[in-house]
Structure formats: C-alpha cells, structure tokens
Amino acid sequence: MSRITLLANARLADDSLVDISIGAEGPTTDGEPSTAVLDIVQAGGSGSGQLAADRQMTDVRDMAGYVVLPRLREPHAHLDKALSADEVDNPTGDLGGAIRAWLDHRISITHDDYVQRALAAVDLYERNGVRLLRSHVDLGSDVGSRGLEALLEVKEKVAERVHIQLVGLPVGLSGENADNVIAVCRRALDLGLDMMGGVPHIEDDPARAIDVILDLAGSHGRGVDIHADENLHPDSSDLATLAGAIIRTGFEYPATASHCVALSMKSPEDQTHVAALAAEAQVTVVALPHTNLFLQARDHASAPPRGLAPVAALAELGVTVQAGGDNLQDPFNPLGSGDPLETAALMVLAGHVTVIDAVAMVSATGRPIPGKGDRAELMAIPGRSVREVMATRPAERLLLKFDV
Ligand SMILES: [Zn+2]
C-alpha cells in the first residue's frame, strides 16, 4: 500500500486529534479496482511532518480548526415532492391535509418540474455533505411511474456525486383498485426501482398491504422500506406486522421501517416486545423528526406528544436506528434545509440521544468517526468540536474524496 495524502491534526467526533493517512489499496487479485482507504493515527508524537516523510507522502493538508466526519447519509427523502412548498399549501397542517393537497397537485407535475426540483434538492443535500441518499417516489394508478422515470434520470446524472436509492411509494395495495396499483409497481420494479415501499397505516388492510410489498420486493430480489405507524395510535402495529411477516416468510432482503411514531405511544413493555421482533427480523428503523414534529399531535391541546420513534427502546434491543430529514419544503414539511446535521440536532433536542449517537444516525458509514479501511470519503467543517459544529452548522463544508 503506497501512501499519498495526510490530513494532519483532524478533530474527530469523539474529540480525538488525529492524522488521517489516505493511500491506495488494490487492485485485488479478483479484479476489484484500486480504492483509496484510510488509516488513522494519533496526532503529534513523531510529528505530522515526520510521519509524512516516513510514509513517503506527497500531500499534507493541515486540518487544524476543522472537525472531520464521514460523509453523511439522508436515509429518507422525497425528491419528487421536494421544494414544492410555494406551489402546494397544506391548509390543515396535518398528515391528512398534506396527503390530500399532494394528491390534488401531483397529477399536474411535468417531467421537467420533477427533474429540476430533484436536481436542486440533490445539490442542497450534497453541499451539506450527503453521499448516500434514499428517496421514496410516488407510484399510483393516476400518475403511474412518471416520478420514477424522472428520478431515474436524476440518479444517473448525479451518480458520481451522490448515490441515490429509489423506493416505490404506492397507496392502494389492498383496496378496490389494488390490481391496477400492483401492476404499476411491477412496471416500476422492471424500470429500475431499488426497493419497494408503501404506507400500510392508511391502507384498507395494513397487514395485506405489507404482504403485497414483501411479495413484490422479494419476487424482484429487492429490499423494502415502508412508512410505518406514522400516527399516534398506540394500537398501530405496522412495525410488528412487518417484522412478523419477515420472520414468517423468511424474506431475505434488507428491510427498513420509517417513522414508527406510534411505537412511542405504547407501554414500555409493548415497546420492548416490538423492538425485540424488529431486532430478530433485522429491520432498521428510521426516525424522522422534522416531518413528525410538524404533522403530528395537532389535535392535542395539552402536552402534545413529540411523535418520534422511541430510539432508546429500539437501540436497547439492538435495532439499528438511523435519522432522516424526510420532506424538504413541501406540504408535508414547509421547512428543512437538506442538512443531516440539522436532523441530528433535532434528535438531540427532541429525541434525547447524545451528540455522538446522533452523528452515527446520519453518517454514511453508520459510525460517527472514520475507521481504518473505510473508503476515503470525508467531510471537514470548521469548529472546535462536533457539538459546536452541530450547534452552528457552518455552511462551509469541505468534501474530501480521494481517488487513486
Ligand atoms: Zn416519507
């Protein structure tokens, strides 16, 4: 392995001060191309200059004054809806109002409008450090897969900068029109959808919808990511139903449940029971503070619930929890900056997780600090600590990508 670059005096999220060396690894005997990977040593000691000389580095960058993080992940976006808030109002401010307003509007969206808004949103996410982005996209018998076709174009256009995964979002998988909606989903999977999703809690038959989602995804070799329990009813059970169906059917692809708001309304014993099921089924949960805080609990005059997935109860049982921004300036959330560090800050303030755990929830690697052997994709933000960086969220973000 030959060394080529050193990032000296980099502050990591755990407050350690390190030198990060970046070098080439490969090509491997099985034909994998060379990749740039990291090595990390404590800063100081023999001195960065000596370390650079020892390892024959040609490029030393002093990162003093910067916090260095892994690139970030946006695990739940809606690129087809993004940046539409000035065109589509949500008169009631709740989830039902947002859905009604969007269904009225979406039929009139042109291909160019989808593409332009999605590209603008991706630019915003990338400037903030996002490398991996998962976006849901509407599928329906009214709009077919028009949004998907536009987002596939966007995905290809930005592939070098941001890796996008697209999840189908149909409604009506268990109702009268189910056959038509399922046909749209099959076409979408053939077109290149990465995962299958849905919204069981607004379906006529949530359990039936979950079975259909798993069947559609499994038959195409894809994973699932559903909008689960996005309400405050303690008896809402999408996450438990999904986990149970995965265990029952032996579904073997990745599974994610986004929102899981209702879980926070269950008793501690019931939360533990559902979390154990989710852990057994290896379902990742994505908490979505922006949209849930905006849409939920508007009918509670006193002490409104926060409407956030109970992170501690899930993590305690070993469930992986990520955090996402969800809607970006659309009728479901008129605000949002496309910044995972804003999401992480909300997880600290409203979800009561620690700063470093919140960083892990939005990190592209799932870890708050870069690790030896990671791909050499980092970001550096001016600040003295990750806490300060999360508090002030400077616009300056150096995206450090090293190729070999
Ligand atoms: Zn969503």
Image: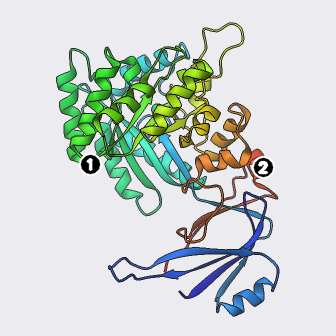
**Residue beneath disc 1:** 192
Q: Give the side of residue 393 with respect to residue 309, left or right.
A: right
Q: Which mark lies nearer to you, 1 or 2?
A: 2
Estimate how packed mark 1 is, as few (under 14), some (14 to 19) or many (20 or more) residues with alpha carbons within 10 Å: some
SS for callout 1: loop
Q: Give the side of residue 295 with respect to residue 109, left or right.
A: right
Q: Position of residue 386 (x, y in %)?
A: 75, 54
Identify the disc placed on residue 387: 2
Number of callouts: 2
Report which quarter residue 220 is drawn in. Answer: top left
Q: Give the side of residue 168 with respect to residue 385, left or right.
A: left
Of mark 1 and mark 2, the one earlier in the sequence is 1
Identify the disc placed on residue 115: none
For marks 1 and 2, give the CA distance: 40 Å
Height in image: 284 above or below 101?
below
Mark 1 is on which residue type? Answer: Gly
